[in-house]
Image (cartoon, grey):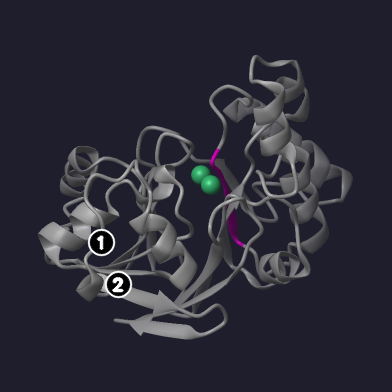
């Protein structure tokens, strides 16, 4: 399996997994212009190589291009019924997903696309609905957990089972507290249905990562209330306190907000 992040954070989230001849996309929250450019740079054809898009939830930074991908390319957009309803009434979307391109996901039920086996699970967040994804192919278990208000038993279990993990590390609590966001927004972000902070992500990893975890990418960093160095240092410090050495026990990277990652091979 191979993995690329094409963007991560409030300006747009989009991840791509490739196995054999098939690619799938997890979220399509960047513009079509950028999506086409980045895919071309990686020599991937949206038309011929990407089989489907799996959506976590109906916030604009995750769905910006799903309508165009469905309408222009006829790709299937997988989401829960509630997320599809949220997409349909999202005013940020100029083009909505036509009914013949909608596929409804049931949490806990596995969908097969090419070599991929994709299973969604519940994630608490203030959208119509929100899911994380487990994607299995080539003997590898990849897990995406983003836009997480608080850590649940399901999330702990998925961290414990992952070989490769993309995990939200949205904000630093003090930066959010001291920053210029309104009290309402601060409460929303740090609330039970908002976003995971650096310490929460680090503790989740420290307590539930197993020796089968090979690499973690911290994702969805806030531009205003976080910094890549701070997110990494917080994770490293908490992990070391728990006897885990990043770079030795498992790899640790921070995904860039506005540019693609390298093309990682997951084996
Ligand atoms: Zn988001
Ligand atoms: Zn969100």
| Quarter containing the N terminus | bottom left
Which quadrant would residue 259 be assigned to in this image? top left
> Would you say 93 lies left or right of 3 here?
left
Rate crowding at label 2 as few (under 14), some (14 to 19) or many (20 or more) other CA atoms within 10 Å. some
Residue at (33%, 76%) from the top-left corner? 103
Residue 203 position, x and y percent, is 80, 49
Q: What element carries label 1?
A: loop
Is residue 131 something that shows in the picture?
Answer: yes
Q: Give the magenta-colored segment's residue range.
A: 214-220
Residue underneath mark 1: 97
18 or 7, which lies in front? 7
Q: Earlier in the sequence, mark 1 or mark 2?
A: 1
Residue 39 in percent (x, y) is at 21, 49
Whether 138 is among the magenta residues is: no
In the displayed structure, does residue 33 sit left or right of residue 14? Answer: left
| Residue at 64%, 64% in the rendered image | 213
Which label is found at residue 102?
A: 2
Residue contact between numbered discs 1 and 2, judged by CB atoms under 8 Å: yes
Dot 1 alpha-carbon crowd within 10 angstroms: few under 14, some 14 to 19, many 20 or more: many
Q: Is the magenta stretch mostly helix, strand or loop?
A: strand
Q: In this view, does 37 lie above or below 209?
A: above
Res 21 visible? no
Magenta span contains residue 219: yes
Ligand 2 contact, mark 2 (Cβ < 8 Å): no
Of helix, strand and loop, which one carries label 2?
strand
Q: From the top left corner, tell me how far across and down residue 10 is, in percent.
A: 48, 36
Mark 1 to mark 2 CA distance (whole Å):
7 Å
């Amino acid at each position: 399996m191979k993995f690329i992040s094409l963007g991560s954070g409030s300006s747009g989230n989009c991840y791509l997994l490739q196995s054999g001849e098939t690619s799938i996309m997890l979220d399509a929250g960047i513009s079509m212009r950028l999506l086409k450019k980045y895919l071309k740079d990686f020599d991937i054809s949206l038309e011929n190589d990407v089989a489907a898009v799996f959506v976590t939830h109906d916030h604009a930074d995750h769905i910006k291009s799903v309508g165009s991908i469905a309408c222009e390319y006829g790709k299937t957009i997988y989401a829960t019924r509630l997320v599809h309803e949220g997409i349909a009434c999202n005013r940020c979307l100029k083009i909505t997903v036509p009914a013949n391109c909608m596929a409804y996901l049931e949490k806990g039920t596995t969908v097969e696309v090419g070599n991929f086996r994709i299973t969604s699970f519940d994630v608490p967040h203030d959208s119509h609905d929100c899911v994380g994804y487990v994607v299995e192919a080539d003997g590898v278990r990849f897990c995406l957990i983003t836009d997480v208000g608080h850590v649940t038993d399901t999330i702990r279990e998925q961290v414990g089972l992952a070989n490769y993990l993309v995990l939200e590390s949205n904000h630093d609590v003090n930066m959010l507290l001291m920053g210029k966001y309104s009290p309402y927004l601060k409460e929303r972000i740090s609330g039970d249905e908002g976003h995971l902070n650096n310490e929460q992500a680090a503790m989740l990893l420290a307590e539930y990562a197993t020796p089968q975890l090979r690499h973690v990418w911290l994702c969805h960093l806030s531009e205003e209330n976080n910094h890549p160095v701070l997110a990494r240092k917080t994770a490293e410090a908490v992990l070391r306190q728990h006897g885990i050495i990043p770079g030795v026990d498992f790899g640790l990277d921070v995904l860039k907000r506005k540019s693609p990652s390298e093309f990682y091979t997951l084996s």
